[in-house]
Image: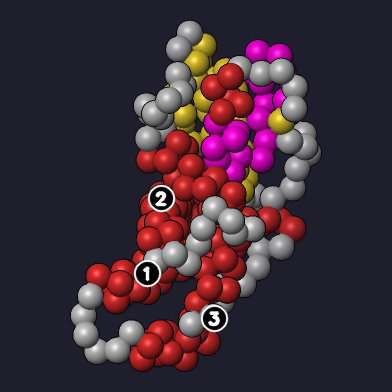
Amino acid sequence: MEKMDADIKKLIDLTTIVKVDDNMLRKTIFGDEYIGSRFQNNPGQQVVLSDLIINWENKWLSLGSVWNKKRQNYRFLFDFFRRYYFSFEQLRINKVSCINEAFGDNAKMVHFNELTGVSLYGMYYHGNKCIKLLEELNLLSKNDHDWAFCKKFSGTRNKLIEHNYDPIGLKLQIEPLILKLMDTSSLLETLVHLPSKERAYEVYFDYYEDYYRLERIIVDIIKCF
């Protein structure tokens, strides 16, 4: 990694960013300049939810019939994982619809793009909730192989999505270019503004890759129920 602004380095360490372009130096300072996206290389298929029914039934049986906080947190995990799943399902559907309208109805294209953006925000929100519940239920810990990625996923939600206009601990403003969701890539171009410099950096994260990695982590845990 080349020498760079301390806040940009911190942003890389805290999130799933895969590429950083320095617009002042006019060069890529982190990641591969010609990095490909998950959408182009392997769009993937989501897990079949019905395949997990037996695992959830096993979990409810193991918890007995008495209500307690632990049982409720498993209910929350069940709900938020499905919302995470369906947020991405709608993202995929709307993204493809948007691309198909590229040479058709411009108003429809913009409409589908905005729906894709709403689904993207929902995906990171519900995914972050799942991670917090996995920690609360002691299903995920700092000793796990997937811990680092999960914390970066939460960091992406916190720094790039939720608190982008005023990210805690960073002297930056971050602007995800939602309009870019209509292209045939899953690398979302995101502008980073310094206090004295607009568009100082362009950073990229792959929301398809982020989804499938977290889905795999959660499903592996569910399959152990």
**Residue carrying label 1:** 77
The local secondary structure at tag 3 comes to loop
Q: Which residues are magenta?
A: 11-29
- Callout in the foreground (2, 1): 1
Q: Which mark is residue 213?
A: none
Please provide percent x and percent y for residue 185: 64, 49
Please provide percent x and percent y for residue 6: 58, 19
**Residue carrying label 3:** 223
Q: Identify which residue, 75 or 100, lies in the foreground.
A: 75
Hey, which quadrant is residue 2 in on the image?
top right
Residues under labels 3 and 1: Cα distance?
14 Å
Q: Amino acid at mark 2?
A: Tyr
Q: Is residue 38 magenta?
A: no
Q: Amino acid at mark 3?
A: Lys
Q: Is residue 17 magenta?
A: yes
Upstream in the sequence, badge 3 or badge 2?
A: 2
The local secondary structure at tag 2 comes to helix
28 versus 110 height, above or below: above
Upstream in the sequence, badge 2 or badge 1?
A: 1
The extreme left residue here reads 67
Q: Residues within 10 Å of mark 2 (few under 14, many from 20)?
A: some
The residue positioned 29% from the left and 76% from the top of the image is 71
Horizontal side of residue 22 vs 117, given as left or right: right
Horizontal side of residue 175 vs 208, given as left or right: left
The reply to whether dot 3 and dot 2 touch (C-beta < 8 Å) is no
The residue positioned 50% from the left and 16% from the top of the image is 194
Q: Residues within 10 Å of mark 3 (few under 14, many from 20)?
A: some
